[in-house]
Image (tube, rainbow, N blue to C red):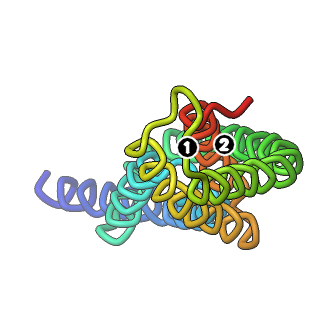
Amino acid sequence: MKKQSVWLLATLAAVLAVGCANQKAPAEQAVAGAETALAAVRDNAQKYVPDQLQAVESQFAALKDSLAKGDYKAVLTGAPTLNSAIRSMKDAAEAKKADADAALAKAKDAWGPLSAEVPKMVDAVQSRVTALSKSHHLPKGVTKDGLASAKSGVDSLKSMWSDASNASASGDFTTAVTKAQGVKDKAAEIMRSLGMP
C-alpha cells in the first residue's frame, strides 16, 4: 500500500510537471505578445493618455512577475485582460490624437487671417498713439491717463504678437492662435479707448 502511494505521488508530480511545462510556452508567448502590442502603442499613449499607460504598464509588470515566479496559470488568465486594456488604451490614444490633429488643422486655418489682421491693428494703434502724443488737444473721450495706458499697451501688444509669431514658427498653431486672439482683443480695447473706429 505504501509503495502504491509513493508511485501515485510520483505519477501525480510528473503529471503536474508536464502540465506546468505545457503552460510555460503559451505563458511566455502571451507575455511576449503583450509586450509587442504595448511597445507599438507606447509613444502615442504616453503623449495622449499617460494615465491609462501607467495602469497598463502596472498590469504588464504584474504579468511578467507571475511569469518569472512560474505562475503560468495566472499569466494565461491575466493576458486576455491585459490585451483588452492595451486595445482600449490604443483606441483612446488614437481618438485623442485625431482630436489634437483636428484642433491643429483648425488652428492653422485660423492663423492665416489673424496673422494678416492683427499686425495691421497693432500698427493702427501705434499710429494713433503717436499722433495723439504729438497733439496739443486730445479728442473728446480720450484722457491723458488713457493715452499713457495706450502707450504702454502698444509695447505689450508688440511683445504678445512676437510670442504668437514665435509659436507659429515653431509649429504650435494652437498657442499661436490663442496668443494672437489675445493681441486682437487687447488691441480692440485700446482702439476703443482712443476713440478709433
Residue 173's x, y, as percent? 73, 56
User: Between disc 2 and disc 1, whose residue precedes?
Assistant: 1
Tell me the quarter of the picture where residue 17 sits: bottom left
Report the residue marked by disc 1.
137
The label shown at residue 172 is none
Task: Please rate how many residues cluster around mark 2, counting C-alpha atoms within 10 Å: few if below 14, some from 14 to 19, many from 20.
Answer: many
Q: Give the camera-side residue of 20 and 99.
A: 99
Q: Split into 4 quadrants, where in the image is the C terminus? A: top right
Q: Give the camera-side residue of 130 and 114.
A: 130
Residue 16's x, y, as percent? 37, 57
Q: Is residue 161 visible?
A: yes
Residue under the point 53% across and 62% down: 31
Residue 75's x, y, as percent? 43, 53
Tell me the quarter of the picture where residue 60 sits: bottom left
Amino acid under label 1? Answer: His
Tell me the quarter of the picture where residue 89 sits: top right
Residue under the point 53% across and 64% down: 155
